[in-house]
Image: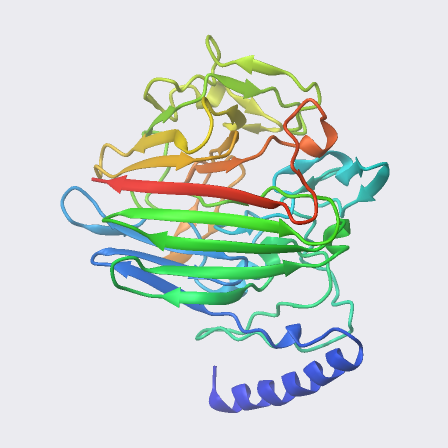
Amino acid sequence: MARGAQVLLALLCVAAAASAVASGAGVGARKMVGVYELRMGDFSVKVTNFGARVMSIVLPDAKGNLADVILGKDTIAEYVDDEFYFGPITGRIAQRVARGRFVLDGKAYHMYKNDGNNTIHGSHRCTMPNPNGLTCYCVLERSNSLPTVPDSGGGRGFCKSIWTVKEYVAGGDSPYITFYYHSFDGEEGLPGSVDAYVTYRMSSPYTLGVHMNGTALDKATPVNFLLHAYWNLAGHGSGDVLDHTLRLFASRYAVLDEELLPSSGRIEPVAGTLLDFRTPTPIGARIRKVISGRGVGYDTNYIIDGEGMRPVAQVRDGKSGRALELWANQPTMQLYTGNYLNHTKGKDGKVYEKYAGFCLETMGYVDAVNHPEFPSQTLRPGQVYKHDMVFKFSF
């Protein structure tokens, strides 16, 4: 951005911030968006506080060649209009909520429907006008173009919000960054305020921890976060992931209907089904026989065996030799294989087609707010939600 444009933007933002304060919006409109790198040798991770999002993870292969194994976009501006959820933390209620509605303590709550008749990954709506009437949003990227990101009001969800950088250590023995977001009472139509934190931390060679937590401050509220990263261990834009070998530590799955909701509440064994990955199996071995909602491919909710911090998945790309092992402490995981990617513009001039990446989304049970038979996701004031993931890479 030219220096003159930056000066003009700054002047406009001062005026907008003053208007926001006068209208009761506070100083949130002055938040800045940045890109932050964590590095240990030839292992690097880039994240942004726009959606507490993973933008890239660069790893060597068996021959020492580096590649970025995360699908995504080049600029923050492109993430503003991202409809595929490339790399963000989603919440306050991740995954789907039937009809965007639930009842808590006898009161009905309604969320914005952004997935047909339902809500998915928090009730953001990218085209929502700023409720304070501001025409300038004080969000700067360190380079490239200016994203127009509103930072006051509701309706964005975690993945379209600007998080605060609380701590940042770029290098050393354990590089890390912690993002913070205050989700206010009534945001997304949800009750109560929640303080949310996400920490990305490198520990030991080629290990990345993702630690999410949320505290209910004043009212009972449902809380369920997830990381929606797309992986391709051969390198983003290298083609599909159908030859990647996958093992899941899951002997059961939640039966989902055509809207990808667990409407029946049934939990079934994977044995004898197309969904069985208990032994290492190529992702593409049966994928074209699997119907998930209206798509062909996996969009499946698995119940992870065991409790606490435990192995969830192992994935290996035979061509590059790169492998990923995921551990987590959540009860379920959504396996998604990029079924709706379709000539989608990605980073570095790459184009992502169907099955160009896979997601391993650990979380609570889908639509638990509408299924009392599932473990509750409701926090009472003062209670803390903790979601830990650890990715161990090898080659």
Tell me which residue sits at (79%, 82%) in the image.
22
Where residue 340 sits: x, y (%)? 54, 38
Whether residue 243 is situated above or below residue 395 in the rendered picture: above
Quadrant containing the C terminus in the rendered view: top left
Where residue 69 sits: x, y (%)? 34, 47
For this view, does 272 lie left or right of residue 232? Answer: right
Q: Nearer the viewer, residue 343 or 214?
A: 214
Q: Residue 355 occupies which quadrant of the picture?
A: top left
Q: Nearer the viewer, residue 330 or 113?
A: 330
Q: Nearer the viewer, residue 314 or 340?
A: 314
For the image, the number of numbered tags is 0
For this view, does 257 lie left or right of residue 283? Answer: right
Tell me which residue sits at (47%, 65%) in the image.
75
Where residue 231 sits: x, y (%)? 39, 42
Where residue 311 sits: x, y (%)? 37, 30
Whether residue 245 is situated above or below residue 50 in the rendered picture: above
Q: Nearer the viewer, residue 367 or 166?
A: 166
Q: Residue furthest top?
A: 272
**Is residue 134 something that shows in the picture?**
yes
For this view, does 103 lie left or right of residue 344? Answer: right
